[in-house]
């Protein structure tokens, strides 16, 4: 069912410093910074030949990544994102198999303007898992 690895997301407390590490130290192609108020984060995408890294910095008072950064003050891998052909078909199969979808269970428009869902980390090996309709 799942297809390509769309991105790995890394939560950071200082996205400009994190971007500089990828751009200057690792020599990667980085996007400009974007604020995503609907998701409570600012993002920068690192474009690699075979996938992307999504840097996330908290935005606003109740960012969904604030708690993660309290526990991981130097940053850390926050989630992985896999592409699916049809997000509703994928969701219905996963729910039928007992997996939990976060939030109200309906897809939201993600950072790339495409529908996304998040799956409960306890159902997927301790890893917050995002699905994005490709
Ligand atoms: Co993501």
Image (cartoon, rainbow, N blue to C red):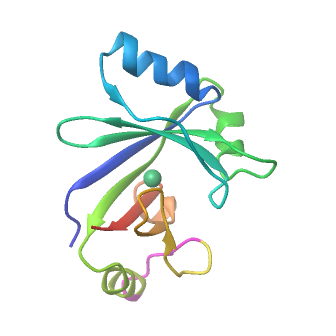
Query: In the depicted view, which residue is nearer to us: 122 or 102?
Result: 102
- Name the quadrant containing residue 132: bottom left
- Position of 86 with respect to 23 (left or right) is left
Horizontal and vertical percent position of residue 109 = 49, 69
**Residue ID at (33%, 85%):** 93
The image shows a total of numbered marks equal to 0
Task: In the rendered view, tell whether residue 55 sits above or below residue 119.
Answer: above
| Above or below 66: residue 101 | below
Residue 20 at x, y percent in the picture: 47, 17
For this orientation, the residue located farthest to the right is: 61
- Is residue 92 one of those drawn in magenta? no
Q: Quadrant of the C terminus?
A: bottom left
User: Is the stretch drawn in magenta largely helix, strand or loop?
Assistant: loop
Tell me the residue at 38%/89% (across/down): 96
Q: Quadrant of the N terminus?
A: bottom left
In magenta, the rendered stretch is 96-102
Image quarter of residue 112? bottom left
Q: List x then y, in percent, for residue 113.
A: 43, 64
Q: Residue at x 28, y 80 (%)?
A: 86
| In the image, farthest residue toward the top | 25
**Residue at coordinates 66% horizontally, 36% vertically from top-left?**
69
- Do we see residue 26 in this rendering? yes
> Is residue 53 left or right of 41 when viewed as pictured?
left
Image quarter for residue 46? top left
Q: Is residue 126 visible?
A: no
- Magenta highlight on residue 99: yes
Residue situated in front as seen by the camera: 96 or 66? 66
Which is nearer the eye, 132 or 66? 132
**Residue 10 percent coordinates (x, y):** 48, 37
Q: Residue furthest front?
A: 32
């Amino acid at each position: 069912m799942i297809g390509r690895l769309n991105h790995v997301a890394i939560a950071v407390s200082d996205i400009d410093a994190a971007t500089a590490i990828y751009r200057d130290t690792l020599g990667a192609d980085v996007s400009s910074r974007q604020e995503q108020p609907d998701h409570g984060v600012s993002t920068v995408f690192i474009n690699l030949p075979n996938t992307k890294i999504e840097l996330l910095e908290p935005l606003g008072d109740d960012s969904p990544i604030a708690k993660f950064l309290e526990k991981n003050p130097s940053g850390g891998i926050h989630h992985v994102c896999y592409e699916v052909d049809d997000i509703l078909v994928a969701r219905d199969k996963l729910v039928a198999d007992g997996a939990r979808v976060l939030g109200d269970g309906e897809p939201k428009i993600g950072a790339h303007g495409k529908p996304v869902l998040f799956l409960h980390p306890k159902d997927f090996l301790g890893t917050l898992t995002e699905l994005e309709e490709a």
